[in-house]
Amino acid sequence: MVLVWLLLLLTLLAGARLLWGQWKLRNLHLPPLVPGFLHLLQPNLPIYLLGLTQRLGPIYRLRLGLQDVVVLNSKRTIEEALVRKWVDFAGRPQIPSYKLASQHCPDISLGDYSLFWKAHKKLTRSALLLGVRSSMEPRVEQLTQEFCERMRAQAGTPVTIQKEFSVLTCS
């Protein structure tokens, strides 16, 4: 009986050692209180995040609930991410509010990076560039006024905001 317990203990220790070795090889820079979002409950969050930047460097990873988020904290790293390595940083996290606002349909602002998104972006950009020949400001003002009038007309009643945003962005 003792031999069985010793073999079980030895197996558990060997497994823990193997997992610990794998974890060490990943070389992750994790802030304290990694589980969930407890680190966001700090009393002075901007100062706390600045401290993480000073300790972990200009790029580190935070965990927001079950979502991993890469944090960039210097002009140079942000520029590199957005200009030189934009494909690596393209994409959006799958957040429930995004899904609700876009009605589970990928769009140019909330869609994740994919071939469909690239085609959508290309079409949107070419349409905007064609429309820029004349000033777009009067058109944007007109659309904003129409949106505000529709919202005022529905005062006091429930509004399907997804439909309103869809009408506004597709106009």
Image: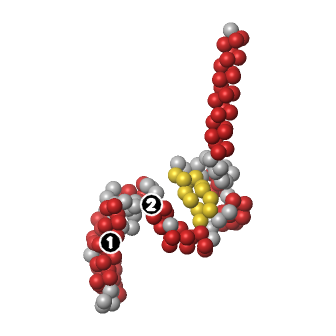
Q: Residue at x 69, y 51 (%)?
A: 32
Identify the mark nearer the N-term, 2 or 1: 2
Residue occupying the far top of the picture: 1
Report the coloring of the rendering.
Answer: secondary structure
- Can you tell which quarter of the image residue 12 is in? top right
Residue that carries the numbered disc 1 in the rendered image = 122
Front disc: 2 or 1: 1
Distance between the alpha carbons at the discs numbered 2 and 1: 18 Å
How many residues crowd around disc 2 within 10 Å: few (fewer than 14), some, or many (20 or more)?
few
Q: How many numbered tags mark residues here?
A: 2
Work out whether residue 44 can be spotted.
no
Rendering quarter of residue 40: bottom right
SS at badge 2: loop
Whether residue 170 is visible to the viewer of this picture, yes or no, is yes
Residue 41 vertical placement versus 126 (above, below): above
Quadrant location of the N terminus in the rendered image = top right
Left or right of 61, for residue 167: left
Kind of element beneath mark 1: helix
The residue located at (55%, 70%) in the rendering is: 80
Q: Amino acid at mark 1?
A: Lys
Q: Residue at x 64, y 51 (%)?
A: 28
Q: Is residue 53 above or below residue 34?
A: below
* Rendered image: mark on residue 92: 2
Q: Please provide percent x and percent y for residue 89.
A: 49, 63
Kind of residue sitting beneath label 2: Arg
Q: Position of residue 47 (x, y in %)?
A: 70, 66
Q: Residue furthest bottom?
A: 134
Which residue is more in the foreground, 23 or 46? 23
Residue at left offset 53%, top offset 68%: 81
Q: Is residue 1 above or below residue 66?
A: above
